[in-house]
Amino acid sequence: LKDNVVAVGEIGYDSMTPAEDAALTAQLQLAADHGLPAMVHTPHRDKLSGLRRTLDVVRESALDVERVLIDHLNETTVKEAKDSGAWLGFSIYPDTKMDEQRMVAVLTEYGPEKVLVNSAADWGRSDPLKTRAVGDALLAAGFDEDAVDQVLWRNPLAFYRLSGRLGELTVPAPAGTAEHEGNSIQRGAPRTAGE
């Protein structure tokens, strides 16, 4: 196992077949054997049944449910997933799955604890900046910056730190004040008055 691996996954169900049962069982055992958390995909169809089947397999495994992130949740699955003690993952897409306003509604009802938001910019029409859009929507809905930071930064770090392989991450200071072709705005540096 490579030293910088911080989780097993994304694993889980699509069609909920016996072959997928066997694969998920083996992959959860792999995570348990190596002390890693697991990220588990819920199926696109029949999500609630898929979540329940997933939780049954997790509970029968050697991996504690508190070391599992259940991803691609929505309004029909979030309560049961939260009640299980698992981490809660939500994928934000332009046309499918969750959008910013639905995510705000979920966080309003269930809170930001153990919630991770991703853009899953992996197939079809997707937008990697949807996580930023969720942060903006949360602020507009009255959430404070601490809650936004928790959902978009601290919760993901806390989940991946369950591996014991992810140390402290610091934001580097902006690089110097040198200009490049007359541009004095440095990457990552805050703007100053007059810019």
Image (cartoon, rainbow, N blue to C red):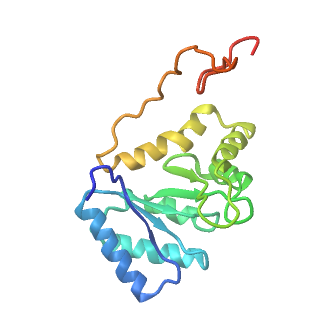
* Residue found at x 54% / y 79%: 49
* Residue found at x 66% / y 37%: 143
Q: Quadrant of the C terminus?
A: top right
- Outermost residue, top side: 193
163 left or right, relative to 45: left
Q: Quadrant of the N terminus?
A: bottom left
The number of callouts visible is 0
Residue 72 place in picture, x, y as percent: 57, 64
Residue 24 place in picture, x, y as percent: 38, 75
86 or 189: which is nearer to us?
189
Give the vertical position of 26 relative to 88 (above or below): below
- Outermost residue, front side: 181
Quarter holding residue 69: bottom left
Quarter holding residue 125: bottom right
- Outermost residue, bottom side: 18
87 left or right, relative to 1: right
Residue 39 place in picture, x, y as percent: 43, 61
171 left or right, relative to 120: left
Give the vertical position of 118 relative to 13 (above or below): above
128 or 46: which is nearer to us?
128
* Residue found at x 51% / y 46%: 113
192 left or right, relative to 31: right
56 or 193: which is nearer to us?
193
Residue 98 place in picture, x, y as percent: 67, 60
